[in-house]
Amino acid sequence: MHRILLIAKRDFIATVMTKAFIFGLLILPILFGGSFLVIAGMQNRANQQERHVAILDRTGAVAAAVIEAADEANRKDMFDKLTGRRTMPQYRFVESTPADGNWDHQRLALSDQVRRQELFAFVEIAPDALHPGSGQAPPIAVYSSAGGIDLFQAWFAGPVNDGLRRVRLAQLGVSHDQYAEALTPVRLESMNLVSQDPRTNAILEPRKKGEVESFAVPYALVLMMAMIVLFSANPMLTAVAEDKTQRVFEMMLASATPFEIMAGKVLAALARSLVSSALYIVGGILALQGMAMFGLIPFSVLPWFFVYLVADVTLMCSLGAAFGSACNSTQDAQQLVGILMLPVLIPLMLMVTVLQQPNGGMSTALSLFPLFTPILMMMRQSMPGGVPAWQPWVGLAGVLVFSLVGTWAAARIFRIGILFQGTTPKVADLFRWAVRG
């Protein structure tokens, strides 16, 4: 143990005292925080703009009603009701009709205006949109230069349908004064699940589900864990491969066993990851406190965060040391980086599925798979609904067993790999080393 601690101390100090480690430790939150500030600034700037939208009414009867409904919705949605902050641009709508009756020429002319940024977009209402009969109403075409998710299209769907309904009600004899009551929508409220006080057995009042606590908090914790694990495991692989090519291990083996060398390096990587995670967690708590969002901090899952982090870093760094010891050059090590990253990247790609159905059968099964448990179970635990009490313990048991077995196998590979020279071993060779030692 003394030799393991000496090796760990030497690797830890040699790394944390470098400018690269300090720079990376500080620049990462600055880059991520700065990117969110830049996005927020760009969104705020876009919200201050005035955008012009043309309406091509092929029905000849609904343009005025659609523009009236859109103007009302724009005035109502433009400012946040609590803070008074402007949350969307101001849209100006105008009806456009072809002078020569040629709708194709009119579409081309309006498209050119959008390209010249004279218009933000134009909307074409199909001729039978007002009276689709018994069939499905035809789609209303929105022409714009926006890519990806078109926020205007998502917002405008409400006003354009509202305008069409107003014309239909008028044709059915409903007076204009009754439009508001007839068209008032029912608002859906997203709520957390009802829970019971374990001490008094009283049913607690349900709480509204906020977007920050249901998405941002789980996403931030998972992203932080993934980055720390990757930044700990990937350098281990290349560093061990480089030390092997420089014959450093041949000198170290004179005073320590292969297991002690690998254990010391893994322990140093674990200490670095705990330092990084503690700094980021404390910084995040202080930032939320400064923004008066202290209640969003998931204190109940923070111990689980560090437990999963220790298990995941130990396993990934052990595998990184094993893979690095089997390489004969740093180029060989670079080819194995992708394989080493898979246990972290695959859960990240499954995040959307887990967020949509956190307690579904697929999400539960994936989060109980040991390689995916640290990231996916942490995400599910940090969401408002939580998980059944037994699942984190079962997942943790699987992670610990898998980590112990993986570390044991990695140590056996490392013992042979650090002295193995010549051709790069195949995957079958690594399995044979792990089993036979």
Image: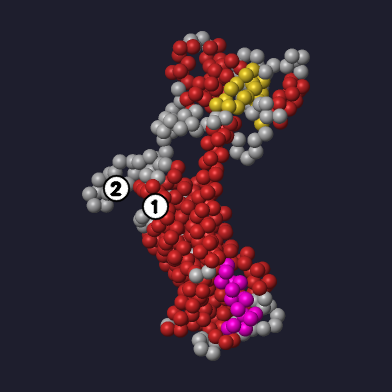
**188 relative to 137, above or below:** below
The one nearer the camera, 197 or 285, is 285
Q: Callout 2: helix, strand or loop?
A: loop
**Residue 24 % position (x, y):** 53, 61
Q: Quadrant of residue 54?
A: top right
Amino acid identity at mark 1: Leu
Label 1 and label 2: CA atoms lie apart by: 30 Å
Task: Kindly tell me whether residue 111 is visible in this rendering.
Answer: no
Instruction: Report whether residue 322 is seen.
Output: yes
Magenta stretch prevailing secondary structure: helix
Residue carrying label 2: 196
Left or right placement of residue 330 versus residue 175 in this view: right
Residue at the spot 46% in from the left edge and 32% down from the top edge: 85
**x and y, in percent, of residue 396 in the image:** 42, 65
Placement of the C terminus among the 4 image quadrants: bottom right
Q: In the rendered view, does 188 fall on the left or right side of 50? A: left
Viewer-side residue, 49 vs 143: 49
36 or 193, which is in the foreground?
A: 36
- For marks 1 and 2, give the one nearer the viewer: 1
Residue depicted at x 22% and y 49%: 200
The boundaries of the magenta stretch are 234-249
Of residues 98 and 57, which is closer to you in this image? 98
Amino acid on which the number 2 mark rests in the picture: Gln
Q: Which residue is mark 1?
A: 286
